[in-house]
Image (cartoon, rainbow, N blue to C red):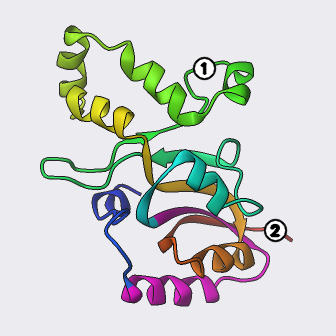
């Protein structure tokens, strides 16, 4: 998955070639195959627009493994990502938006944290900017069928879908 993150294109506009490649890959999956997939968005969306766009297809709070809160930028080897509900208790997570939880988490950082984060190749200022910006560039979702992923791929808000792993039932 690291290579996929290093070439992440969320927020970079439409890419017909990437969409056609994804359609070929998804079409070749067996119908009883389920996948974990990176869904790159054409343009970054705020959380309300994200929820509206994927209503009935993806519950962006419970089904999403990670939200990508940035595109690739100079000096970054992968986008900023946040795992909703990873830091906070389930009860807090259920009643609070994923981006609000991210903002809370980032707001707790102090300058010494910035030193430790830099050792992990994370820039504290860029994390804060992503919190302030509050937009989602893509998501990693798990457990979706070929049919559901093709349905999402047909949405104009989806730039492409990249399969991370698959499993077959039956």
Sequence-first tag of 2 and 1: 1
46 lies left or right of 62: left
State which quadrant residue 9 falls in: bottom left
Q: Which quadrant would residue 167 be assigned to in this image?
A: bottom right
Tell me the magenta residue range: 16-40
The answer to whether 158 appears left or right of 143 in the picture is left
Is 65 situated above or below 32?
above
Residue 19 painted magenta: yes
Q: Which residue is found at the position 63% from the left and 67% from the top?
A: 166
Q: Position of residue 48 (x, y in %)?
A: 59, 48
Q: Residue 59: x and y, percent?
A: 71, 51
Quadrant location of the N terminus? Answer: bottom left
Q: Secondary structure at mark 1?
A: loop
Cα distance between the residues tagged 2 and 1 = 32 Å
Query: Magenta includes 15?
Result: no
Instruction: Give the image location of residue 11, x and y in percent.
Output: 36, 63
Q: In this view, which residue lies farthest toward the left?
A: 75
- Is residue 28 shown to the viewer in this render? no
Position of 141 with respect to 90 (left or right) is left
- Give the residue at x 70% y 57%: 58
User: Which residue corresponds to the image point at 53% horizontal and 37% vertical from the top-left?
Assistant: 83
Pair 2/1: label in front: 1
The residue to which callout 2 is attached is 169
Q: Quadrant of residue 148?
A: bottom right
Q: Is residue 17 left or right of residue 145?
A: left
Secondary structure of residue under mark 2: loop
Q: For this rendering, which residue is in front, 139 or 31? A: 139
Q: Which residue is mark 1?
A: 88
């Amino acid at each position: 998955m690291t290579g996929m993150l290093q070439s992440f294109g969320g927020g970079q506009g439409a890419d017909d070639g990437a969409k056609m490649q994804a359609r070929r890959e998804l079409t070749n999956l067996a119908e009883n195959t389920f996948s974990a997939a990176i869904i790159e968005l054409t343009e970054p969306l705020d959380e309300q627009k994200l929820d509206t766009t994927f209503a009935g297809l993806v519950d962006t709070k419970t089904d999403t493994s990670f939200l990508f809160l940035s595109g690739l930028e100079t000096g970054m080897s992968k986008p900023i990502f946040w795992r909703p509900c990873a830091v906070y208790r389930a009860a807090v997570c259920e009643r609070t938006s994923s981006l609000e939880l991210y903002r809370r988490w980032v707001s707790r950082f102090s300058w010494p944290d910035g030193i430790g984060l830099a050792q992990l190749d994370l820039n504290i200022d860029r994390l804060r900017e992503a919190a302030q910006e509050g937009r989602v560039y893509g998501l990693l979702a798990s457990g979706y069928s070929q049919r559901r992923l093709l349905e999402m791929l047909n949405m104009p808000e989806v730039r492409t879908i990249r399969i991370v792993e698959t499993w077959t039932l039956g």
